[in-house]
Image: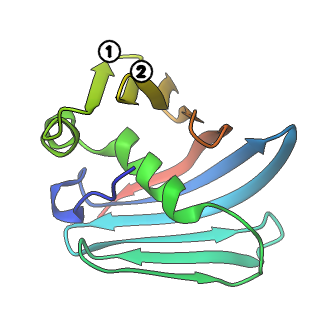
């Protein structure tokens, strides 16, 4: 998965989301504050109790991250997956289809990313506020429910 430049992303916005991370039968729930604007992306993951877990900032060149609670969470990979769900199709095509090894399949209900014929990521657009991410490579799923969306 590739991190995408913030300046080519969706309309600048602040998302408050609930993520259910499911791997090997274990489910973890985190709350996420995700700010996307043309200068960068900031993601902060919190436990439902409010304890900070992870912080990521990405300006299109440099990725900085802090694991604030010593909890294993593939936060930068989840950020790349969220970008694949939120960024415009034209940017995804430019980024992934520039290589002959990547293939994007897309409808109104889903996006599927494959590499060398093997599925890597599927995004299902369940409803206006809910998406379901399936990471085939690392065998986990993430349900993302947007609790609040605010244009900046």
Instruction: Count residues near mark 1 (Cα–Cα under 10 Å), then give few for <14, some for 14-19, many for 20+.
Output: few
Q: Quadrant of residue 97?
A: top left
Q: Identify the element where label 1 is drawn.
A: loop
| Quadrant, the C terminus | bottom left
- Residue 91, given in percent of the width and then of the height, sits at 16, 43
Front residue of 70/55: it is 70
User: Residue, x 35% and y 28% (percent of image)?
Assistant: 116
Front residue of 41/148: it is 41
User: Residue, x 16% and y 63% (percent of image)?
Assistant: 7
User: In the image, 17: left or right of 86?
Assistant: right
Q: Quadrant of residue 38?
A: bottom left
Give me the C-alpha separation between circle 1 and circle 2.
5 Å
Front residue of 85/71: it is 71
The residue labelled by disc 2 is 110
Q: In the picture shown, does residue 73 fall above or below 149?
A: below
The residue labelled by disc 1 is 107
């Amino acid at each position: 998965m590739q991190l995408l430049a913030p300046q080519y992303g969706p309309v600048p916005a602040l998302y408050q989301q609930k993520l259910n991370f499911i791997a090997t039968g274990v489910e973890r729930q985190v709350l996420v504050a995700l700010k996307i604007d043309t200068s960068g992306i900031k993601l902060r993951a919190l436990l439902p109790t409010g304890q900070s877990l992870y912080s990521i900032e990405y300006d299109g060149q440099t990725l900085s991250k802090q694991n604030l609670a010593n909890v294993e969470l593939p936060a930068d990979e989840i950020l790349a997956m969220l970008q694949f769900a939120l960024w415009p199709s034209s940017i995804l095509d430019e980024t992934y289809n520039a290589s002959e090894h990547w293939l994007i399949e897309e409808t109104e209900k889903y996006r599927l990313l494959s590499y060398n014929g093997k599925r890597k990521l599927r995004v299902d657009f369940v409803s206006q506020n809910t998406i379901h991410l399936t990471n085939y490579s690392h065998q986990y799923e993430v349900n993302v429910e947007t609790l609040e969306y605010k244009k900046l």
